Every structure is written in C-alpha cells, then in structure tokens.
Image (cartoon, rainbow, N blue to C red):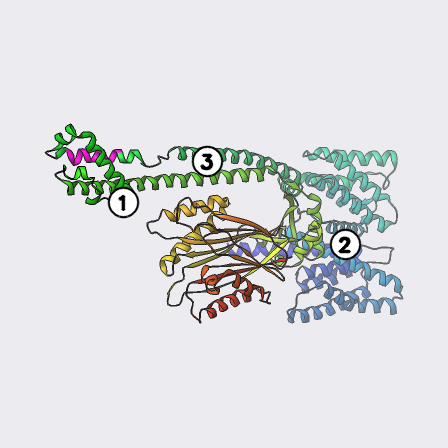
Amino acid sequence: MIDTLGKNKKVILATKYIMFFMLIFIAGRACLNEAITPFVFGLFFALVWCNQNVIILSIIYVLAGYLSSFSTYILLENSLFCVIFAIIYFVHYKTKKPLKYIHLLIYACLCNIPKIFIEIYFLNSNIVLIFVEFVFGLMYTFACIKIFEGVCVRGVCSRFTSTEIICAMVIFCATFCGLMSFNFGEFYLVKLFGVLTFLTAAYVANVTTVMLISISSGLGTFLFLHNPTFLTMFAILGLTVSAFKTKNKYISCIAVLLVECLFGLYFNIGTEFSIVSILPTIIACLVYLLIPSKILDSFGNEFQSTLASLTQQSVINRNREMLYHRLVELGDVFAEMNKVYLSMINGGIMGEDERRLILNEIKIKHCKNCPSFGKCYRIGGGETANCLAVMVNLGIKKGKVNLLDVPTEFAGKCEKLNTLVSSINDLINQYKNYAGLMNNIDASKVLLAEQLEGVSEIMKDLSLEVNKGVIFESGKEKKIIDELTYNNIICSDALVFQDREHILSVTLSVRKDDKDKSGICKVVSRVCKQKMEVVDEVSSTRAGWQILTLKSAPKYGIVFGIASKTKTGSVKSGDCYSVIKIKDEKYLFALCDGMGSGEMAQRTSNTAIDLIENFYKAGFDKEIILSSVNKLISLGKNEVFSALDLCVVDTRVGEGDFIKMGAPESFIKHKDTTEQVKIGALPLGIIQNAESKSEQIYFTSGDKIILATDGIVDAFGTADKMQDHINNITSTNPQTIADDIISKAVATCGGIAKDDMSIIVAKIFER
C-alpha cells in the first residue's frame, strides 16, 4: 500500500514537471515582431513564486530554451540566468525573508544582465528591442503570478477578479502565440488546441468566458503572424460553440465542423481548405467527445456555483419571508399563552371572604364543642356573632388579639375565653399564610405571563426585521474582491447586503493568513463609502480559510474604567457590576448594590446582574426585564433588596438610557460642566410591583458616564459635592477618573471604607 502511494506521488510529480517543461517550451517559441521573446523568463519567475523546485525548474528552463532554438548563445544566456538566480534565491532563502514582488523585480534585473550583455556585444541586437522584451517579460511575470495564485489558492472554477481576467487573457494570448510556431504544412497545432479549448469552455462555462478565451487566443496568433486570419477564425468558432452550447457534445462538434467547412469552401477564411487543414479540428472534436461527461459536468457545476448569486438572493429572500410568517405565528402562540396564565390568577382570599371563613371555622371547631353553645347561639346568637366579628377584625388589623380586645358584654358570657382568643389568633395566622401562598402562586403566574409576553414581543420584532428583506450589492462584491486582490489579500467570495437603512453587512471568505490584515477594513470601507468594522469571524469548512463579517461602524466608540473597594472589615463586597455588549452597537453598564455587605448581599446583587444580563442578551424589553427580576427577587425566602443602576448606550446614535431602582445619582461629565441624572424609584425586591424609572440622554464626543453605588455618594456627603469633585478632574482617561473618585471617597471617610464602593466610568468618543 505504501509503495503504491509512493509511486502515485512520483507519477504526479513527474507529470507536473513535464507540463512545466511544455509550458516553458511553448513560451520560448512565442515571438513578437520576429525578435522579441518576452514570455519565458516571466513564466519561470511565476513558478518560483508558487514554491516550485528551483533546481528542477532551472534544468527545464535551460533545456527548453535550447530545444526551442538550438542556439549556443541561448544555451549560454539561459545557463547564466539560472546560475545567478539560484545563487540569489538560496541566499534569500537562508535569510528566511518572505519573497515579495520588489524582490522579483530586482532579481529579474540581475539575472538578465548576462543576456543583455551577450545580445548587445555578440549578437548586435537592438537595445530598444532588448528593453521592450524585458518590460514585457516583467508584465507577463505579474500576469502569471496573479493567475497561479488564484488557481492554486481558490481553485480553477473560482470567481476571478477583473485584474485576474485580464491576466488570464494575456496568458492565453502568449500561449497561442507560442503554439502558432508549431505547424506542419497545412496542419496547424494551434487550431487543434483552440477548438478543443473552445468546446470545453462552452460546456463548463458561460458565453462571456468562451468569447474572452477565443478572442485572446486569436490575438496570440495575430501577434505571431501579423495578420488576422486565425483571429477571425477563432472569433467565429467561439461564437459557434456559444450558439450551440448544449450538454449534447455531438451537436457542438457537428456545428464546428460545418462552420469551418462553410467558411473554408465559400468564404475562403483561414488557411487554404483541404483535408489536412480541417484535420486539427476533427482531432479536437474526437478528443472532446472522448472526455467523460461526468468530468465536464463536475467542472461545470463548480463553475456555475460562482455565478448563481441572483438565484441565491432570490432563495434567501424567499426563506426570510417564510421565516417572517413563522415568527408571527409563534408570537401569536406566546401571546395567547400569556392571556391564559393571566386568566388563571385567583387573587387570594381577602376582605369579607377571609373574615367569613374565620368566623365559620371558630363556630365549627371551637364553639360547637362548648356546653353553652346552644345557649349562646339560641338566645344571644346575633350578639355573639357580632362580638366574634369585632375580635376577628381587630386580629386581622393588628395581627393578633388579646383579652383586652374582647367586648365587655361578651367577656362575662364566654366560659372558654382564653381558648377562644388563642383559636382566633391561630386561624388568623393560618389564613394569612394561606393568603401569602396564594399571592405567591399568583405572582408566579404573573411572572410567567410577563415572560410569555416578552417572548411574543421578541418574536414579533424578529419577524419585522426579517420581513425587511435583503438588498444585495453585487457590484460592490466584485469590486471588494478586486480591491483586496490589489492589496495582496486573497478573497475567494464576498456577499454584500443591506439589512437595515444605511446599515451594510459584508461577509468575506479570506485566507487565514490574511484575516488580521488592516487593509481589509480599509478596502471594504472605501468600496462601501462608509466606515466598516469586523464584528464576527468564524473558521470556514474549507481548510485554511476564515469567514469575516463586517458591518457599518457605529458613529461612536466606548472605553471604560471600573474601580471598587470592599467595606473595611467585610470579607466580601455586596456590590456587583457588569459591562457587556448587547448588540453590535449597544452596550450595557450596570451596578447592583445588595442590601448591606457580605456574602448575602453579594449573592443577591450577583443574581440580579446575571438575570439582567441574560434578559438583555435575549432581547427582552427593559420594562419586562426589570419587572421580572424584581418579582423573582421578591419571591425569595430572604427579605433582601438591591439598588440597581443601569445605562444602555446606543453607539450608533449616541443615546444613553438610564434606568434606576433605588440607586443614587449618576453623573455625565462634559468638557467644562457636569450634570446629575437623578431618578427616584424603589429598590429591587421591596415589593413585587415596584416600577423602574428611566431617562434618555444624548451624548456628544468626549462625554463621560459615571455610575456609582451609594457607598461613594454617601462618602462625599451629598451628590452636589461629588459633582463638584468630578467637574474638577482634568484627566480624560476613564480608569484614572474611576480610581481618583474611589480614592477621594475613601480619603473623605478618614481612609476607611464605611460601605462597599463601586464605580463605572465610560467615555464616549466619535470614531
């Protein structure tokens, strides 16, 4: 098995270098103006650029050059060329420096010195022609490098850039110029390769590709012959195979043969018509027919996949429309579930119902077993019931009753007064516990209903976003690929679409070696005419490639600093903070101050922050988030609460949404002034129906947002004193500002932190 694999590798290697020999040999035969052969050394340099073996290429270069002309001078020129290049290349290799275009330019100049010397002093060649040959050779080198890079990295059937298409045409032109030198009487080898190339291209590619190949191939023959004979013929054959483009290969072959016969017999286009002259076309058709259709189909499918952007766009938008309807339906389902849970709320046992049940329980469980039951309820039933009602009302109001609460007229009648008072208190406690349980169950139902309502709203928001459709920018896609290629960044594919007004999304497939290049954002921003930034990157299923997603950059950026100080003598701080990116353009800054200090306060604030983070990430509305978190905390067994201070910043428009529940003042430091943000609301967990208060503020570049817990504000004495201190801070670094405020607060308290202290400072700046 190992021997077989080794033999296969050797066969592949040998085949590859035989093909290189043929290409170099043909390039050496390509001659312009019967004196200029500029293509051969360009092909050599391009193969070296693609990391082919320099020694083997040098041998091939020398051998192919000699066989193409059998000239001793050419043999000497090529030998010196390869020796000089080999020395330079191995010195470059030992220095471990990457090979760049500028290096190839320098090396080409050095390697061609012997050739120039021999041509001028021994062969008396024209200096101008030598210079033209050298310049054309450099241009051909660039063309070969671009095509070899594209084919080796992205594949033969990838979408080529405009530059690569031009380079491919140059290579076809040079190749067919070289093939034009191979003819045997009226048998032209160039016609054989031309017809075979056109037929294959028509099968696997589109009409534009076929015409570009046919015209560039014809131009190569024109440069060699100096007449348009084969240029005209190849253009006509390209049109023919395009017109009869079909999966039935016989039709294309018959059409080509008929057209050549027609024009050869009646219009005398091309060479003199004979059996020998048409033989290359016949051989090309036979070879084409012998190529298995499966192989041609595989190439065709691969090629067409790069041209299916319009179909893909249609499918994407249709799927988005289907997703829109599904999301709307799901939103309606959750909305109905919300109504069901709200209808299940019992409301507990309150008021008259509670009193009536307690009175009934006293009558059954206490009075009925009393020997005086009949006497009390038969003779003074109304008075007895009224006295018991008075005692129950007092018990509900005060929490319990005692002997002093018993009406005077009833105290002398009841024989078991102490037991009665005790029974009333027990029943009041039982019904209070029961009412509390029912209220908690109802609160849980309300909580679930709110979550269902929130999910319903999220579904509907998503459906509206999906229903906007996608506007594809195919023109920008091609331009981005071209521009990236100019900057030596290999991009195999690009997708540009607009998902919201003025917000573009660009997805690129680039080599992993290129993914961190700063030129990517610059190129995409220039093409899209707005600042773009990378928001996501994932590995491609194709090895060695990375998928980058860029979006329109927000107008503003944010940097922040955080500082905290645990209460002196306390092991753990009751404060908790969070800074997260909710969306591409929205940031959440949050401070939560648990009641007191220590482990319990820390656990409460951590719970609140974790809940808020997850709700915001899921896309819930702020009212639902805070209401739900408040209910969850208030339902806990421990009577704890937390002060919550939030600021959600939208960097796309420079807007801040301040939300407070029991939190102290926040501050916004402008260039020369500082303002307070003061919103009154109860802390989290005090009561189940506590409402949050919010205020929206727009920022300008350079503004600083300052959120602080009450431990800091109280240390300054008043919010006004803290505002004055902030206004006098000259630093623009948010971390420096946070550290300064903490230090001042601790110093004001005599170097002792009397409470947990935490602060977040965020700076808004224009990008």
Q: Looking at this rendering, what residue extends furthest in the top direction?
A: 378
> Which residue type carries mark 3?
Phe
- Give how far across and how far down residue 103 sits, in percent: 72, 66
**Quadrant the C terminus occupies:** bottom right
Q: Residue at x 87, y 45 (%)?
A: 228
> Which residue type carries mark 1?
Gly
Query: What segment is highlighted magenta in the picture?
Result: 356-367
Q: Nearer the viewer, mark 1 or mark 2?
A: 1
Report the side of 310 relative to 695 (left or right). Answer: right
Q: Is residue 434 magenta?
A: no
Q: Looking at this rendering, what residue extends furthest in the left direction?
A: 371
**460, above or below 610, in the image:** above
Q: Nearer the viewer, mark 3 or mark 1?
A: 1
Q: Nearer the viewer, mark 2 or mark 3?
A: 3
The CA span between labels 1 and 2 is 107 Å
Dot 3 or dot 1, earlier in sequence:
3
Name which quarter of the figure residue 559 lies in: bottom right
Foreground of the two, 311 or 111? 311
**481, above or below 130, in the image:** above
Foreground of the two, 498 or 92? 498
The label shown at residue 26 is 2
Name which quarter of the figure residue 85 lies in: bottom right
Q: What residue did someone put label 1 on? A: 399
The label shown at residue 334 is 3
> Which residue type carries mark 2?
Ile
Q: Residue at x 77, y 65 (%)?
A: 78
- Give how far across and how far down residue 694 sits, in percent: 52, 48
The CA span between labels 3 and 1 is 41 Å
- Residue 196: in sight, yes or no? yes
Dot 2 or dot 3, earlier in sequence:
2
